[in-house]
Image (cartoon, grey):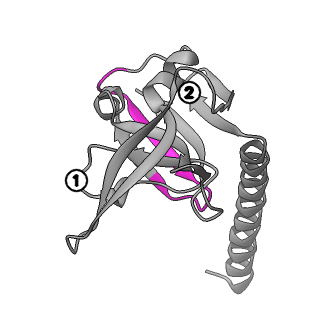
Amino acid sequence: MKKTTKYLIAALCALIVIVLVTVNRKNASKDDEHVSAGELVFETAAGETVYSYTESGDGYISFDTEMRRKNGDVFAKTYSGRELSAILAEMDCAITESSEITAVCADSYEIVLTGAEVLDPGNVYIVSREGEAALDEESGPFMLVVNHDEFATRWGRNIVRIKVSE
């Protein structure tokens, strides 16, 4: 291969990376704006929908859970939030046990859940309070809690987006 061809390929690759980084930054800043306004973005087959999260109403509850670590330590916690299945129902987003729901954190970490897990009563919550206080900056404003998991490894901090697919 000629030297000029190699340089052209390298320049094209660099251009592609720059475009992808720019697009990703725009999407991340949009998500940050929504979260600051108390909103979550939901992606479904029908497109994106912005959900205005509220701490009032029947669906917003306090619940106790245990955060268990691999070393055996157990911490009792009280959170307040809404069941993800209830949020999806409010949005007329029907899921089945075979659906795949992905919670995306601000740092792009993703937690994948099955529809069966989300439909399990008292299992998957989007929370905004720990005890009586709002979540700290590191954890919130929205956090995913998978209540029936043995360990808290699939809990997600700073949730900004939920993707729903079949």
Tell me the element at label 1.
loop
In reply to whether residue 104 is colored magenta, the answer given is: yes
Of residues 49 and 119, the one nearer the viewer is 119
Question: Which of the image's four quarters has the C terminus?
Answer: top left
In reply to whether residue 105 is colored magenta, the answer given is: yes
User: Picture coordinates of residue 136 (x, y %)?
Assistant: 62, 61
User: Picture coordinates of residue 55 (x, y %)?
Assistant: 63, 33
Tell me the element at label 2.
strand
Residue 130, above or below 73? above
Residue 137, above or below 45? below
Question: Along the horizontal axis of the image, is 131 left or right of 26?
Answer: left
Question: Callout 1, which amino acid?
Answer: Glu
Residue 21, above or below 6? above
Question: Along the horizontal axis of the image, is 12 left or right of 149?
Answer: right
Residue 126, above or below 7? above
Question: Callout 2, which amino acid?
Answer: Thr
Q: Which mark is residue 129?
A: none
Q: Mark 2 to mark 1: distance in Å?
A: 29 Å
What residue span does the magenta drawing correspond to?
Answer: 96-110
Query: Is tag 2's residue or tag 1's residue first in the polypeptide sequence?
Result: 2
Mark 2 neighbour density, 10 Å: few (under 14) some (14–19) many (20 or more):
some
Of residues 157 and 43, the one nearer the viewer is 157
Residue in view at x 60 percent, y 65 percent:
138
Give the farthest residue toward the front: 132
On the image, numbered disc 2 is attached to which residue?
A: 44
Question: Which of the image's four quarters has the N terminus?
Answer: bottom right
On the image, numbered disc 1 is attached to which residue?
A: 150
User: Picture coordinates of residue 157 (x, y %)?
Assistant: 53, 57
Of residues 10 and 116, the one nearer the viewer is 116
